[in-house]
Image (cartoon, rainbow, N blue to C red):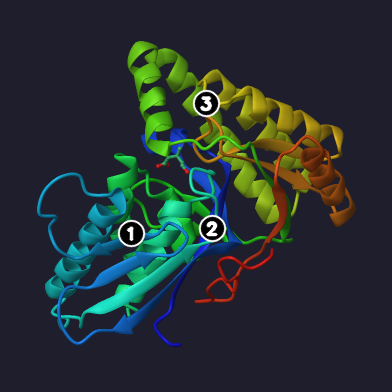
Amino acid sequence: MSGVGRAWGKVILLGEHAVVYGVPAIAVGIDRGARAEPSPISAGPSELFVRGWGIEAKDVEAKAGDEPSVARAFRALAEITRDRRRARGEAELSPVAISAAADLPPGGGLGCSAALGVAVARALDPSADSEEIALRAGAWEQVFHGNPSGVDAAVSAAGGCVYFERGKPIERVAMREPLLLCVGNTGVASSTKTMVESVARLRARRPEVCEKSFEGIRSLVRNARLAVEAGDAVGLGRLMDLNQMLLSGLFVSTEEIEAMCSLARSAGALGAKLTGAGGGGSVVALVPDPAVAERVLFAWEKEGYSSFFARAFAPAEGAQPSATPGSAP
Ligand code: MEV
């Protein structure tokens, strides 16, 4: 059906947390994400149903009491969609009932909330381009994350490999070779908002420590971009390992994350680190070939960590992910 909004899941290769403070990050879209299907309704406010979460929301102010975050996020998204269209002299959109779902673990560091926001933003307004959709999804993300840098929504809308700096248009990074990634879940859900707040507290207490880490991450990200462009997977893996060390110094790593990184490296990964906010969530390992990927996935699964293989590649202009939420990888 036309008008179906799709969004990529995201894996941050390097730069999480520092990106909130203006350091660039480099991230890739993965072929798992979210999907939102709009159906026209004759009258009344637009509605959203998130399958798998059993959450329904309407584009109207709640009468009283607590409102689920998804409902507030949906209203914020509908509002910014209206405002931005009005400012451009575009016609009012007809109301729709949207059925949405994500095939990413919530709290898993893979951009589940941003992917849903992007897919729903597209379902509300299929005519908007990726940059505009990412901006609108930012209003949705703000409800969940308080102070999002925007990297999750930007990658979720664009796919491919993206060099992102807060407040600037994204830069696409030309990938010489597809990147072969293993993504494993620690089994511990984490909240991006909580982890971003914990780094903010550390920065308030020890500004010099954080600034040094952020500057280190800035140069790692710069080199990582060159490594991706040159197809230097070995170099990229080393930079990911160094980024993991700096993230540990910001206290966003955990025992499970460190254990998973060690397992991946011992199985032949070129580099491994947490991806996303840390404190649980997911680990990403860069591998040189599918045989090593098998070994990494096996090592993780043996210890009870669920995982999957992902190939990150540059999508064709305007392409959207093919995965159907709920289907096998
Ligand atoms: C979360 O996926 C990435 C963080 O850097 C937060 C953000 O950029 O908004 C931790």
Residue at the disc numbered 2: 9
Residue at the disc numbered 1: 137
Within 10 angstroms of label 1, few (less than 14), some, or many (20 or more) residues?
many
Farthest residue, direction left: 63
Q: Which numbered disc flags the more N-terminal residue, 2 or 3?
A: 2
Identified at 77% across, 29% down, the residue is 262
Q: Quadrant of the C terminus?
A: bottom right
User: Is disc 2 placed on a helix, strand or loop?
Assistant: strand
Compute the Cα span from label 2 to label 3.
Answer: 21 Å
Residue 159 % position (x, y): 53, 63
Residue 295 % position (x, y): 87, 45
Residue 327 % position (x, y): 63, 68
Compute the Cα span from label 1 to label 3.
Answer: 25 Å
Residue 129 at least partly seen: no
Identified at 33% across, 45% down, the residue is 144
Residue 78 to residue 208: above or below = below
Residue at the disc numbered 3: 252
Q: Which numbered disc flags the more N-terminal residue, 1 or 3?
A: 1
Compute the Cα span from label 1 to label 2.
Answer: 14 Å
| Residue type at numbered disc 3 | Val
User: Is disc 3 placed on a helix, strand or loop?
Assistant: loop
Q: Is residue 319 left or right of residue 270?
A: left
Q: Quadrant of the N terminus?
A: bottom left
Mark 2 close to ligand 1, CB under 8 Å:
no
- The answer to whether the residue labelled 1 contacts the one labelled 3, judged by CB atoms less than 8 Å apart, is no
Within 10 angstroms of label 2, few (less than 14), some, or many (20 or more) residues?
many
Residue 138 at least partly seen: yes
Residue 280 to residue 286: above or below = above
| Residue type at numbered disc 1 | Ala
